Image (spheres, grey):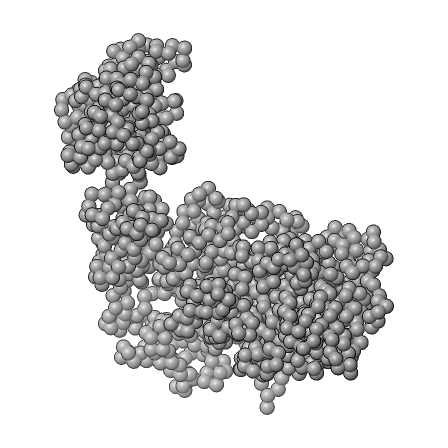
C-alpha cells in the first residue's frame, strides 16, 4: 500500500489561508471554462492548446481559446517577469463592446465579449470547428535550426511546467519538432502574418529539401523582424461562453492574435512583448459605438499589494508594487518589477490629411484612435469587478470601455474622479494619471491602500460594418529597478524603446549579431572552443550591419550551469576579442538601481585586443582550479555590436548558446599527432614577401592531408572586389577546394583568421611599405652585399644594421635616405607618413596610395648629369647630379624607366645642395641638422619629389619628353599631387614619392659651416646608387604548401586502451561533485568504446543491475539504482564490463557509501 507522507498542520495552514484570501479572490474563483481548466500533463497533447512567448525576458502564456498571461499548470500568474522568476501578471485579455444592429429585438443590442477571468471566445476561425486540429496555437522562432540543446531544454521546461533538470529527451525533441511543424505549416490562409519577399501580395514560399520555407529564397513566416512569433485565432461564436462572461449574446467577431518578441533578454527590446489583435466583424450587421480595451489583472509577486496608474503622454497604463519589496521577488533577490501596457495603435477611422497605420503599413487620410480612457478597480478601491454571467456585467463593462465607473446605468454614468493632486475631486477619464516616482498628481496608494488591482485602457468609439477589419497593437513592458518606484521609472524608460521601434513600423529593429557557431572539443587537460570554422557564419556575424550597429567583438564566458546566463553572478567572462579601432569599454544609458535613475554604465569591456575566433581553456575560471577529466564545464561565446550614435543600448550582445564540455582522453583507439598551439612548417615557392602561419587549434579535427595555399584574382567585373587578390586553400590529398576568396591579413601579429580542418590558417600579404634601403654602388663600383642607406635605429629596414660596411661612400662619408625634417621626423614611421602622404593624389591620406608603386623598386643614381624641375621657385629646369629611376622588377633591367625630379629649392640658389645654418642665420640654431641623429652634424639636401611620366616606355623616352615640355612651356605641367590617370600629355605625369632628402650622417657641424664644401662631402660619390625596395605582394605565382598532423585510429590501440577504463568517484562517499541535486546520484565510467554491457553484482554474486551503452561518448553513468529503480545499499560492487566490438572485458570494484535515504513514498 502506497501512503503519502502528510502534515496535518500544513493542511490546517492551507485551509486558514484559503479562508483569509476568499474576499480578495472572489473574481478568480471557479472562473475557468470547461475547456480551459488547469493542465496537469501536456506531454501527450494532440495539438498545442497552450504556448508562450519566452524568447526575451518575459515568459508569457497564451491559450488557444483566448486566455492569456495565465499559467495552465498552476492556474496562477502566467506573465512571468523577469523570465524565470515570479509572476507579474495573473491574467489579461482583450475586451470589446458595442451596439449591434441585429433585427432580432429579442436579443439585447448592446453586447460585450472578450477574455477576463472567463473566456468569452472559442478556438478557431469564425464558422470553423473549435476542435479542428488547426484551431490551435502556432509558435515559430527564426533560429529554430540552430538552437542549442540548452536553449531547447530551458524552453521545454517552461512549456511543460517543469524544471530544466526534469526535462526529458522526449520533451526537448518534441519542442524542436513543434517549431519545425509550425514553420512548415504556418497558417497564412487563416491570417497568420508572413514576409512577402516578392511583394506580390501572395504567400509563395520556396521550400528547401525538407519542405520548409527558405527565407533566403522566398516568402516565409513571421512579422516585424521578430525572433519569436505566437499566432492563434479565436471567435465569439459560442453563445454559452459569451453569456458565461458577460450575460450577453455574441457580437459575431473573429480575432486573430499575433504576439512577438526579440531574443535580447538583457536589452530594452527584450523587456517587451508586442501583441496585435486583428478584429473582423463576421456578423451580417453593423456594430455601432464600439470600443475595445486591454484588460489586465497584475500581480507583481503577492497579489494583495499592488497599485496602478496611467501616463497619458505615453498612452501607457501600468502597475507596480505598493511596497518597496515583495516576498515572492525577495526569493530571487529582486525588487518587485513594474509592468505596463503601451497602446500603440487603435482602430482606424477616416481623417482627411492624417496618416494611420494598418497591417504595419501607412494609410493616408485616416488616423488611429488613441487610448481614450483608463480605468481601474479591485480590492481596496470603491469599485469591484463587473459581474460575470449576467447582463449587468455587460452594462458595467460598457461603462468601463467608455471611460466611466463600472455601474449598471449606461445613461446616467458615474465618472471616475481624481483622488489626489491638484485636480482632486474632478471628473476624469484618466484617473491616477500622476507620477508615482515623484509623487506628483493623482497617485494610487494615497486614498486607497495597495490591494488586488485590475486595470484597463480603452479606445473608441468606432463603427464596424459587416466584414470590416480593425487592428489594435499593444506592447506589454517590464521594468526592474532597486525598488518598486525605481521599477516604474525603468519601465517608462523601456517604453521609449518600444515606441521608437513601433514608429519605424518595425523596419528599424535593433538586433545583436548572429551568435557564433562554436565547435567545442574536449582534450585531456584543456578545452578548445572554435567559432572560426564556418566562413559563412563568420561573415554573417561580422559583416551584417543592422541599422547603425556594426560588429565589434566576441565574449567568452564560463557559466556555472547548463541553464545559467551570462549575467549570472557566478558567470565569468574569460576573454573579449574585439576589433582594434579605439572602441574599448562601451557605456550605455540604462536604469541603475543604485542611483535610482538612468545613468551611463559600462556594458561591454573591450580592450582593442583584436578579433580572434578560437580559445584554448586550461582552467576552471569559476573555481580557479585546474580542469578535471570527467567533470563537465559550461561555456558560451557571444558576439556584440555597437552603435556610437545611440544613448541607450549602444551595444547589443547575441544570445548565449551553452556548450557542455567534459575534458577527456582521446576516445579508445584514437591518437592525436598534433598538439594544440603547435606550428606547422610551410614551404613557399614564388617571389612574394607574403607570409603564412599554420597553427593547430583542434588536434582532434586535423586530417593528415597535404594542403596548398594559392592566390587568384577576382575577375568578376561586376564585383566590388574586382581586380583584388584573394587566397584559397586546396586539399591536395583529396583534391577538394576547402575555401576560396579569403582576404589576406596585413601581417601575422593578429589572430583574425579562420580555421579549417582544425588548423588556424593565417595568410598575410606583406604590408604595403618599403622593404629595404640599400646602397648598391658607390664611387668604387657595385657593393655586394649592399651597404645600409638609412638609419636602422629609427626603424628603417636595411641590409646591414650592424654597419659592417662603413662608411658607405668611397669619399669617406655616410649617406641616408630620409624625409624633409621639421624637428620630429626622425623615425621610419615619419618617413612613411610624409613620403607617401600624397602618393597617388592630393588628399589620399595616410599613404594609402603607395599601392600605386608596389611592387616596383626604385633607384637614385648619381650620374652627374641629371635634370630636375624647380616647381616652387623659378619654374625652370635645373641641372642636378642624380637621376630617379623606376626599376620595376629588380631582376629585369629591361623594364627600367626614368622619372622626373621636382625640386624644392630650399635655399633658392638654383642648385641641389646640402643645407647649413648660415643660409638663414635668423632661424634657430641647428635648423640645418636632421633629427635622424643627435648632435648638430647631419645636414640634409633640398627636398625632391618623384614624378612618373605618362609615357613609361623603358628607358628615358618619357623623361626626355617631359623635360623638353617643361623647358618649353611649364604652365602645362603636371602638378606635384597628380594621381594616376590625371595626366594627359607626353610631358605630363603623376606623383609618386614626396619630400625626400638625402642626409650626410655625421657630415659636419651645421652651425659653423658656410657652404656645403665645409662638410666631409658635399654630395654622395659619382656612381653611387641608392636602391629603395618595396614589399612584394602575393601573386598567382606564389604557392605555400604544408602537411597537417593526423588523427590515427586502430583496433589494436583500442584494445590496449581497455586498460584505461575506470570509474569515478571510487569510493563513492555519499557525494559526487558533478551531482546537481540529491535526486541525481551517480558514478561515471570512462574511456569506453561505443558499445558496452555492464553487469553489476553485489558481493553475494547477485545481479543488481544490467546496463547497455551504445553511443559515441566514452562516458557512461550508473545512477546507483537497482533494476527496480531503488537506491542500492552501501557496500562493494563488482562491475563486469563486456565490450563486444573489441572482444575485451574489464572487471572493476566499486565501493558505495550511500547517504541517509528519506523516502517520500513508501
Q: Nearer the viewer, residue 57 or 7?
A: 57
| Residue 920 location (% of width, % of height) | 37, 11
Q: Nearer the viewer, residue 160 or 574?
A: 160
Question: In this image, 572 relative to 447: left or right?
Answer: left
Residue 918 sits in which quadrant?
Answer: top left
Question: In this image, 366 relative to 544: left or right?
Answer: right
- Is any part of residue 508 visible from this angle? yes
Residue 906 sits in which quadrant?
Answer: top left
Q: Quadrant of the N terminus?
A: bottom right
| Residue occupying the far left of the picture | 781
Q: Relative to residue 693, is residue 1066 depicted above or below? A: below
Q: Nearer the viewer, residue 411 or 1075?
A: 411
Q: Relative to residue 78, is residue 6 depicted above or below? A: below
Q: Relative to residue 974, is residue 760 depicted above or below? A: below
| Residue 257 location (% of width, % of height) | 60, 70
Residue 1100 sits in which quadrant?
Answer: bottom left
Tell me what residue is drawn at x 76 percent, y 74 percent.
Answer: 110
Question: In this image, 898 relative to 604: left or right?
Answer: left
| Residue occupying the far front of the picture | 352
Q: Quadrant of the C terminus?
A: bottom right
Question: In this image, 209 relative to 1004: left or right?
Answer: right
- Is any part of residue 25 visible from this angle? no
Tell me what residue is drawn at x 39 percent, y 25 percent.
Answer: 824
| Residue 849 location (% of width, % of height) | 33, 36
Tell me what residue is drawn at x 37 percent, y 15 percent.
Answer: 926
Tell me what residue is drawn at x 35 percent, y 34 percent.
Answer: 847
Amino acid at each position: 500500500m502506497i501512503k503519502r507522507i502528510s502534515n496535518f498542520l500544513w493542511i490546517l495552514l492551507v485551509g486558514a489561508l484559503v479562508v483569509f484570501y476568499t474576499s480578495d479572490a472572489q473574481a478568480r474563483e471557479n472562473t475557468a471554462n470547461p475547456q480551459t481548466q488547469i493542465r496537469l500533463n501536456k506531454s501527450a497533447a494532440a495539438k498545442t492548446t497552450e504556448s508562450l512567448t519566452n524568447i526575451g525576458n518575459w515568459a508569457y502564456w497564451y491559450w488557444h481559446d483566448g486566455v492569456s498571461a495565465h499559467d495552465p499548470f498552476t492556474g496562477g500568474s502566467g506573465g512571468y517577469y523577469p523570465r524565470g522568476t515570479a509572476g507579474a501578471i495573473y491574467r489579461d485579455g482583450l475586451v470589446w463592446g458595442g451596439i449591434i444592429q441585429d433585427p432580432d429585438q429579442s436579443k439585447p443590442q448592446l453586447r460585450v465579449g472578450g477574455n477576463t477571468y472567463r473566456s468569452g471566445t472559442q478556438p478557431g476561425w469564425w464558422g470553423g470547428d473549435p476542435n479542428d486540429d488547426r484551431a490551435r496555437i502556432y509558435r515559430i522562432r527564426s533560429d529554430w535550426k540552430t538552437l542549442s540543446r540548452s536553449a531547447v531544454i530551458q524552453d521545454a521546461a517552461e512549456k511543460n511546467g517543469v524544471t530544466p533538470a526534469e526535462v526529458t529527451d522526449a520533451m526537448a525533441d518534441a519542442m524542436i519538432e513543434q517549431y519545425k511543424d509550425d514553420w512548415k505549416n504556418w497558417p497564412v490562409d487563416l491570417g497568420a502574418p508572413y514576409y512577402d519577399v516578392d511583394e506580390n501580395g501572395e504567400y509563395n514560399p520556396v521550400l528547401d529539401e525538407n519542405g520548409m520555407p527558405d527565407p533566403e529564397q522566398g516568402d516565409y513566416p513571421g512579422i516585424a523582424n521578430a525572433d519569436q512569433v505566437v499566432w492563434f485565432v479565436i471567435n465569439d461564436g459560442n453563445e454559452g461562453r459569451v453569456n458565461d462572461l458577460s450575460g450577453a449574446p455574441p457580437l459575431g467577431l473573429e480575432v486573430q492574435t499575433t504576439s512577438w518578441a526579440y531574443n535580447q533578454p538583457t536589452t530594452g527590446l527584450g523587456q517587451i512583448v508586442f501583441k496585435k489583435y486583428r478584429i473582423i466583424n463576421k456578423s451580417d450587421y453593423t456594430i455601432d459605438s464600439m470600443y475595445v480595451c486591454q484588460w489586465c489583472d497584475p500581480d507583481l509577486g503577492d497579489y494583495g499589494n499592488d497599485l496602478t496608474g496611467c501616463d497619458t503622454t505615453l498612452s501607457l497604463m501600468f502597475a507596480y508594487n505598493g511596497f518597496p519589496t515583495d516576498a515572492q521577488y525577495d526569493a530571487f533577490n529582486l525588487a518587485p518589477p513594474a509592468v505596463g501596457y503601451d497602446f500603440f495603435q487603435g482602430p482606424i477611422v477616416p481623417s482627411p490629411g492624417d496618416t494611420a497605420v494598418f497591417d504595419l503599413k501607412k494609410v493616408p487620410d485616416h488616423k488611429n484612435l488613441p487610448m481614450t480612457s483608463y480605468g481601474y478597480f479591485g480590492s481596496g478601491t470603491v469599485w469591484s469587478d463587473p459581474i460575470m454571467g449576467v447582463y449587468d456585467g455587460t452594462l458595467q463593462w460598457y461603462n468601463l470601455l467608455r471611460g466611466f465607473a463600472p455601474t449598471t446605468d449606461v445613461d446616467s454614468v458615474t465618472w471616475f474622479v481624481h483622488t489626489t493632486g491638484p485636480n482632486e475631486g474632478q471628473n476624469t477619464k484618466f484617473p491616477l494619471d500622476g507620477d508615482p516616482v515623484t509623487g506628483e498628481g493623482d497617485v494610487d496608494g494615497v486614498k486607497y491602500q495597495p490591494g488586488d488591482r485590475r486595470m484597463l485602457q480603452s479606445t473608441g468609439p468606432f463603427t464596424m460594418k459587416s466584414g470590416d477589419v480593425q487592428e489594435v497593437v499593444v506592447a506589454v513592458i517590464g521594468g526592474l529597478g532597486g525598488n518598486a518606484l525605481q521599477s516604474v521609472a525603468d519601465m517608462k524608460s523601456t517604453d521609449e524603446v518600444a515606441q521608437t521601434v513601433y514608429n519605424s513600423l518595425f523596419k528599424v529593429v535593433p538586433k545583436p549579431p548572429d551568435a557564433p557557431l562554436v565547435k567545442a572539443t574536449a582534450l585531456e587537460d584543456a578545452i578548445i572552443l572554435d567559432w572560426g570554422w564556418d566562413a559563412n557564419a563568420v561573415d554573417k556575424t561580422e559583416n551584417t550591419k543592422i541599422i547603425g550597429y556594426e560588429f565589434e567583438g566576441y565574449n567568452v564566458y564560463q557559466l556555472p550551469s547548463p541553464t545559467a546566463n551570462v549575467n549570472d553572478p557566478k558567470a565569468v567572462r574569460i576573454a573579449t576579442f574585439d576589433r582594434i579601432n579605439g572602441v574599448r569599454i562601451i557605456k550605455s544609458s540604462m536604469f541603475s538601481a543604485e542611483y535610482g535613475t538612468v545613468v551611463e554604465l559600462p556594458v561591454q569591456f573591450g580592450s582593442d585586443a583584436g578579433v580572434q575566433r578560437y580559445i584554448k581553456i586550461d582552467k576552471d575560471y569559476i573555481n580557479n582550479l585546474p580542469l578535471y577529466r570527467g567533470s563537465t564545464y559550461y561555456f558560451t561565446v557571444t558576439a556584440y555590436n555597437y552603435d556610437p550614435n545611440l544613448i541607450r543600448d549602444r551595444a547589443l550582445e547575441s544570445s548565449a548558446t551553452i556548450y557542455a564540455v567534459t575534458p577527456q582522453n582521446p576516445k579508445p583507439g584514437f591518437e592525436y599527432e598534433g598538439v594544440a598551439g603547435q606550428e606547422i612548417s610551410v614551404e613557399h615557392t614564388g617571389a612574394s614577401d607574403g607570409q603564412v602561419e599554420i597553427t593547430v587549434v583542434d588536434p582532434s579535427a586535423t586530417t593528415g592531408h597535404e594542403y596548398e595555399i594559392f592566390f587568384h584574382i577576382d575577375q568578376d567585373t561586376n564585383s566590388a572586389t574586382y581586380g583584388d587578390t584573394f587566397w584559397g586553400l586546396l586539399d591536395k590529398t583529396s583534391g577538394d577546394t576547402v575555401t576560396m576568396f579569403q582576404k589576406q591579413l596585413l601581417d601575422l601579429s593578429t589572430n583574425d583568421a579562420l580555421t579549417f580542418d582544425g588548423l588556424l590558417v593565417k595568410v598575410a600579404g606583406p604590408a604595403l611599405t618599403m622593404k629595404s634601403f640599400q646602397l648598391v654602388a658607390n664611387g668604387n663600383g657595385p657593393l655586394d652585399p649592399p651597404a645600409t642607406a638609412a638609419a636602422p635605429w629609427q626603424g628603417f629596414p636595411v641590409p646591414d644594421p650592424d654597419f659592417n660596411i662603413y662608411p658607405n661612400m668611397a669619399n669617406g662619408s655616410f649617406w641616408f635616405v630620409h624625409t624633409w625634417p621639421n624637428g620630429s621626423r626622425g623615425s621610419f614611421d615619419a618617413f612613411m607618413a610624409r613620403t607617401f602622404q600624397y602618393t597617388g593624389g592630393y588628399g589620399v591620406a595616410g599613404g594609402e596610395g603607395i599601392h600605386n608603386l608596389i611592387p616596383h623598386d626604385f633607384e637614385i643614381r648619381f650620374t652627374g648629369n641629371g635634370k630636375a624641375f624647380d616647381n616652387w621657385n623659378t619654374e625652370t629646369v635645373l641641372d642636378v647630379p642624380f637621376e630617379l629611376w623606376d626599376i620595376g622588377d629588380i631582376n629585369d633591367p629591361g623594364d627600367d624607366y626614368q622619372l622626373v625630379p621636382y625640386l624644392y629649392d630650399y635655399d633658392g640658389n638654383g642648385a641641389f645642395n646640402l643645407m647649413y645654418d648660415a643660409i638663414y642665420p635668423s632661424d634657430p640654431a641647428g635648423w640645418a641638422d636632421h633629427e635622424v641623429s643627435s648632435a648638430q652634424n647631419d645636414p640634409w639636401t633640398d627636398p625632391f619629389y618623384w614624378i612618373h611620366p605618362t609615357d613609361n616606355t623603358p628607358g628615358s623616352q618619357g623623361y626626355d619628353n617631359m623635360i623638353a615640355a617643361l623647358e618649353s612651356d611649364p604652365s602645362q605641367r603636371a602638378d606635384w599631387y597628380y594621381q594616376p590617370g590625371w595626366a594627359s600629355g607626353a610631358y605630363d605625369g603623376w606623383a609618386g614619392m614626396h619630400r625626400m632628402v638625402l642626409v650626410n650622417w655625421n657630415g659636419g657641424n651645421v652651425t659653423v659651416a658656410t657652404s656645403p664644401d665645409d662638410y666631409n662631402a658635399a654630395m654622395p660619390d659619382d656612381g653611387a646608387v641608392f636602391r629603395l625596395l618595396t614589399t612584394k605582394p602575393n601573386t598567382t605565382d606564389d604557392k605555400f604548401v604544408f602537411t597537417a598532423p593526423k588523427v590515427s585510429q586502430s583496433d589494436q590501440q583500442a584494445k590496449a586502451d581497455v586498460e584505461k577504463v575506470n570509474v569515478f568517484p571510487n569510493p563513492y562517499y555519499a557525494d559526487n561533485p558533478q551531482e546537481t541535486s540529491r535526486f541525481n546520484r551517480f558514478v561515471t565510467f570512462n574511456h569506453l568504446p561505443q558499445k558496452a554491457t555492464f553487469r553489476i553484482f553485489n558481493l553475494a554474486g547477485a545481479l543488481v543491475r544490467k546496463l547497455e551503452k551504445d553511443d559515441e561518448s566514452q562516458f557512461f553513468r550508473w545512477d546507483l539504482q537497482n533494476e527496480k529503480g531503488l537506491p542500492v545499499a552501501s557496500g562493494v560492487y563488482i562491475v563486469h564490463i563486456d565490450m563486444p566490438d573489441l572482444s575485451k572485458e574489464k572487471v572493476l570494484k566499486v565501493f558505495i557509501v550511500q547517504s541517509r535515504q528519506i523516502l517520500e513514498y513508501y
